[in-house]
Amino acid sequence: MSKKHTDVDFITDELAVLQHGIIVSMAQDPSDQLKKKKKITRADSPKPKVEGTGVVAMWGEGNDYPQDVIELANQDLELLPLLDKKGRLLQGREVIAVNLVWDEQKKDFNIERIDDPEINGFLSNRRTQRYWRESCVDFTWFHNFFADLIKDVEGDKIVYIGTHAAEDCRWGKMNDKGIIEMCYVSSYWPSAKPEEKDKVMGHPVLDPYSYTVVEDLRENTKHDRVVWPSSYPTPGQAYYQNAPWHKYLFSDWSKIKALVPKWKVKLMDKVLSARFILSIPVNYWPTQHKDWHKLDYSQRLEIKKAKVREIDGNLTGLNGVGRTILTETGTDQEGKEIPALKLTPIDGSTNIEGKTEDSQEASQYMMRSLDLDPTIVGNGPGRGKDAGSGSDKRVAFNILVALLQPYRDVILEPLYFIAEYNGWLKKYPNLRFKVLEVELETLDKAHSTSVINNPVTKSENENN
C-alpha cells in the first residue's frame, strides 16, 4: 500500500513518484541493508540437556572420555597401527583447488586446476599441511576436530588454519538458542576450570549454521582467533561425536583380545617349560606302603610330594643328564600287572587353538568397527596367510577411497569458509577442493588395471 504525503507518492521505501510524474530512487545505506538481512530467521536448535552446573559441556561422565580412549587404545598392539593407517588413508596425497567450468557442448562441467598464487600458496604452506595432517588424525580418533583460524592484522583475510588437539578441547555449554559460543583448551582436563587462565585458554566459536557467519566475523574486530566446530554427526550426541570404533574399544571383545596374550604368556611359563608328564596310578601307593590305608590325607599327600621331588631331582639340572629312572613292576595275587610309574615326554605342542580363535574373532570385530578391509592392511597375527592378491588390494583401496569422501568433506569445510571469507569464491564461484590419491601401479602393463585416471581431468593415461 502506497504512502501519501502532500504531492509525493511513496511506492516503496526506495521509490517515490512526484506530482509531475518524476520517479525518485532513494538508495539505502549498506548498513541498513545488512540490518534488514539480519532480521531473517536464524537456524536455531533446541538446547540439549546437560549434566553439571559449570560452563563446560562434559566430555564423558568424568570429562575425560578422550583421555580414556587414548589410554585404552595404547594398550592394543594391533589397534594403534591400524588407526595410523586409517589416518594416512584419509589424508590422501595432496589437497588442491579446482574450478568447475561449464562445457556447453558436453552439457557438463570440466574440472580445471586453479592457477592462483594466493590460493595455491595457502594450501601448500607448511601450516595448512600440518592442519590437514592433524585434523585427519583427530577425526580418525574422535570424529571431532577443532579447527583454529586466525585473521591478519587488518582482519580482511584469514591467514592461518591449524588445529587444537582434540583431547585438550571442551565446548562451552550452548546458549538458549542451541549455539556453542566458546571452546576451552587445556592439557589439564578433567581437573581444569575455565577461570584458571594460566591453565585454560578460551576461544570464541563460529556458528557453522549461520548464513551471516562471514559478515559477523568480519565486523567483530575483537575476534581475531576463532574455532570452527567440525565433526561427523552421530545420533544423540549434541556436543561430542563418537567414532564407530569406540564401541568396540569399551566392549567385552576388547577385553577378551587383551586377555589372550596374557593367557599365552602364562601358558608358556607354566606349561610349555615342562618336558614330561608323570603318571602315578592310584593303586601304586598301597603296594609301596603297607600301612597306606591307615594314613590320613595329609600323610598320604606328603608321601606323594616326596616321590615327585625324588623323580624331579633325577630329571632336572646337569646332574640329571643321562640318568635312568628305576621303576618296578610285577603281578598281584590274581596275576594282573601292578601299574608302575609312567613318564610321557611332551611333544612340544599344546592345544591353544581355542584361545587363538577367540583372538581372531575379537580382531575381526575390531576391523569391522574400523571399517577396514583386511585385504588392505593384511592379515593380523594368528590368522591365515592369504591376504588377497594385488588386484584385490586395488579394488579394496578404491572402494575405501570412495567411502572416505563424506569424511573428507567435513575436514574440508573450514577451508570452504576461508575461501568465502578471503574472497576466493567471488573470483571462482565454482571453486572446489579435491584430495589427490596415491596412484597404485601394477606390473601388468597390458591389463586394464594399469590405466590411471588423472584425478583432476579424469582422463586416462597408460602407466609407462
Image (cartoon, rainbow, N blue to C red):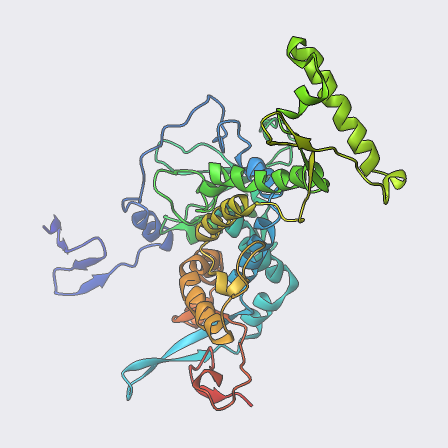
Count of numbered circles on the image: 0
Residue at 66% from the left image edge and 49% from the top image edge? 347
Q: Is residue 216 left or right of residue 86?
A: left
Farthest-out residue, right: 319
Farthest-out residue, left: 1
Q: 302 or 388: which is nearer to us?
A: 302
Instruction: Give coordinates of residue 66: x percent, y percent.
Output: 55, 38
Q: 345 or 232: which is nearer to us?
A: 345
Q: Is residue 402 above or below residue 136?
A: below
Instruction: Give coordinates of residue 210: x percent, y percent.
Output: 37, 48
Q: 57 or 225: which is nearer to us?
A: 57
Q: Is residue 421 left or right of residue 337?
A: left
Q: 68 or 107: which is nearer to us?
A: 68
Instruction: Give coordinates of residue 54: x percent, y percent.
Output: 49, 24
Residue 260 can be seen in this image: yes
Q: Is residue 323 above or below residue 118?
A: above
Residue 158 can be seen in this image: no
Residue at 56% from the left image edge and 44% from the top image edge? 166
Question: Based on the displayed image, in which of its 4 quarters is residue 285 positioned?
Answer: top right
Q: Quadrant of the C terminus?
A: bottom right
Residue at 58% from the left image edge and 36% from the top image edge? 67
Residue at 27% from the left image edge and 44% from the top image edge? 41
Q: Is residue 171 left or right of residue 12?
A: right
Q: Is residue 396 above or below residue 175?
A: below
Q: Is residue 149 left or right of residue 53?
A: right
Instruction: Give coordinates of residue 415: x percent, y percent.
Output: 49, 60
